[in-house]
Amino acid sequence: MTQIFDESGAILPVTILKTGLCQISQIKTTNTDGYNAVQVAYDEQKLDKINKATHGHLKKSSTRIFRSFGEFRVTTPESFKLGQILKPDIFVVGQKVRVTGKSIGKGFQGNQKRNNFSRGPMTHGSKNHRLPGSIGAGSTPGRVYPGKKMAGQLGNSTVTLKSSEILYINNEENILVVKGSVPGKKNTLLKIQHQKY
């Protein structure tokens, strides 16, 4: 993540994204699969890193070997070709996109960090500093209701940012510059798609 200046001199926070080799490995239509979508293969690997079923699937579209696949809904699947390489120029500068990724895992966290709870008093003999407090009623209902906000695992979940704006595209070096931050840490795998398919 870094910052750039626009034409008026304002500072814009941006994230520089490197797009790897992506190739269309399957085209799905309403006639064959019940919906319109394209399957994209990525994460190029050696032959011994994949199984025979994946190798047979890739033979229809490419001589390259990929280990992972993603799917994108499209309205016009006939505009894509099997084996087509996808470059950053499928997007345009100023376009709004959706960016999906795994957020940074923060482990087991308490209520203050995880749910924005306020803490108890720190002085006058109080021993309730960062405790959860009351978690329910008494004998009735005699249990804690489901969905109660409590301490637990924070982060490491799928997050989608909507309406992220593309500010710059470099097709030769496969670089996209997106306004603002994106989910996850460095080298996280991201799914970037049009705001509306």
Image (cartoon, rainbow, N blue to C red):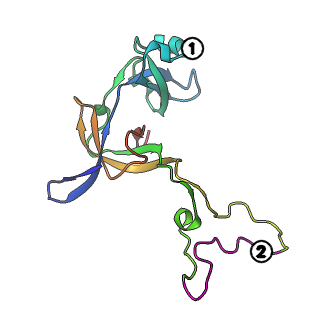
**Crowd tier of the residue under label 1, counting other residues whose Cα lies within 10 Å: few below 14, some 14–19, many 20 or above:** few
Residue 128 drawn at (x, y percent): 62, 78
Residue to which mark 2 is pinned: 137
Residue 9 visible in rendering: yes
Q: Are marks 1 and 2 in contact (CB under 8 Å)?
A: no
What is the CA distance from the residue labelled 1 to the residue labelled 2?
A: 56 Å
Q: Amino acid at mark 2?
A: Ala
Is 192 colored magenta in this rendering? no
* Snapshot quadrant of residue 121: bottom right
Quadrant (top left/top right/bottom left/bottom right) for the C terminus: top left
Is 137 colored magenta in this rendering? yes
- The mark found on residue 139 in the picture is none
Residue to which mark 1 is pinned: 53
Residue 2 drawn at (x, y percent): 26, 50
In percent of the image, x 47 and y 49: which residue is there? 104
Disc 1 element: helix
Q: Which residues are magenta?
A: 123-138
**Circle nearer the N terminus (1, 2):** 1
In percent of the image, x 32 and y 48: which residue is there? 165
In percent of the image, x 55 and y 15: which residue is there? 51
